[in-house]
């Protein structure tokens, strides 16, 4: 069996299971004379979804058809699929996950994330979708002491990069790095367009930094990629580190950033001196 056929078979089984688990009262249907409130018929799902009964039957049978995104979304609404189940169905059909219908609230760092950061000797911190810095470890605080004392409203990576003199001095290639950060930030902002908090951050930065205004208006977009970073620390000198970004499986909206020593450099020794200080 081909991968496509296997995915179609799984899709059919998944839809049948959810259809049989759904309470009829949830979708405004009366209970059956026999069988009570559990389960919908295929024709009921197709009617409530606004698709033909034959088309929906073929979906459950795993036929080789190509339903549109609109059809899949309609069926997902009828079956009351949550975001995880909806994304799973879309993935089986080769579609991307649905965009949020409203801006997600900025998360807080769960306790287990802080424990993870604290277990690393290398500098590491956690970012919210708006690039607010949610948590950090000792090594990152030693690299950038201001992270612990800056006002909560300003504890945002993009804000610090474009407005904090210490961060500018810390980055010997500030011009290139700041533009790279800005293009990566824009690449992630699609779901947040229209979010008042996002608009306020952009406007604050436009007023505070001419370099931000110029970079933002260029509309450069670039996906994140692990890469070498350099930091000119006032106490231990030039650090050659590698920049990595990870997402938590249980909190995918939070990204963890860690800077590890570049091979064939003295970064390990310099980080050790940083901890000693």
Image (tube, rainbow, N blue to C red):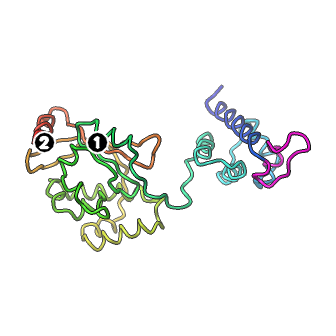
Q: Give the tally of numbered discs.
A: 2
Query: Residue placed at 34% from the left, 68% from the top?
Result: 217
Rendered location of residue 182, percent (x, y): 32, 59
From the image, state whether disc 2 or disc 1 is nearer to you. Answer: 2
The numbered mark at residue 274 is 2
Q: Quadrant of residue 60?
A: top right
**Residue lying furthest front in this view?**
111
Judged from the image, the secondary structure of the residue bearing numbered disc 1 is: strand
Q: Is residue 227 above or below residue 193?
A: above
Q: Where, quadrant-wise, is the C terminus in this rendering?
A: top left
| Quadrant showing the N terminus | top right
Between 139 and 263, the residue placed more toward the observer is 139
How many residues crowd mark 2 within 10 Å: few (<14), some (14–19), many (20+)?
some
Please give the residue where the numbered disc 1 appears in the rendered image: 258
Q: Which residue is outermost to the bottom?
A: 207
Q: Which is more toward the observer, 44 or 225?
A: 44
């Amino acid at each position: 069996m081909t991968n496509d056929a296997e995915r179609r078979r799984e899709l059919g089984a998944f839809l049948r299971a959810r259809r049989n688990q759904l309470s009829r009262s949830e979708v405004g249907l009366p209970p059956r004379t026999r069988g009570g409130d559990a389960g919908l018929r295929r024709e009921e799902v197709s009617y409530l979804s606004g698709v033909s009964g034959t088309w929906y039957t073929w979906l459950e049978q795993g036929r080789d058809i190509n339903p549109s995104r609109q059809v899949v979304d309609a069926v997902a609404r009828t079956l009351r699929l949550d975001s995880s189940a909806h994304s799973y169905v879309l993935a089986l059909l080769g579609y991307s996950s649905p965009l949020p219908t409203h801006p997600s609230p900025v998360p807080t760092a769960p306790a287990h994330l802080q424990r993870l950061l604290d277990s690393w000797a290398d500098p590491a911190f956690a970012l919210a979708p708006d690039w607010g810095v949610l948590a950090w470890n000792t090594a990152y605080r030693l690299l950038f002491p201001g992270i612990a004392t800056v006002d909560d409203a300003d504890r945002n990576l993009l804000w610090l990069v474009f407005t904090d003199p210490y961060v500018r001095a810390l980055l010997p290639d500030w011009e290139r790095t700041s533009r790279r950060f800005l293009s990566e930030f824009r690449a992630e902002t699609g779901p947040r367009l229209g979010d008042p908090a996002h608009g306020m951050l952009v406007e604050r930065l436009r007023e505070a930094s001419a370099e931000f205004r110029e970079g933002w208006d260029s509309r450069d977009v670039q996906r994140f990629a692990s890469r070498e970073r350099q930091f000119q620390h006032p106490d231990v000198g030039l650090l050659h580190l590698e920049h990595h970004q990870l997402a938590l499986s249980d909190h995918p909206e939070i990204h963890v950033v860690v800077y590890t020593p570049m091979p064939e450099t003295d970064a390990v020794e310099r980080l050790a001196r940083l901890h000693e200080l």
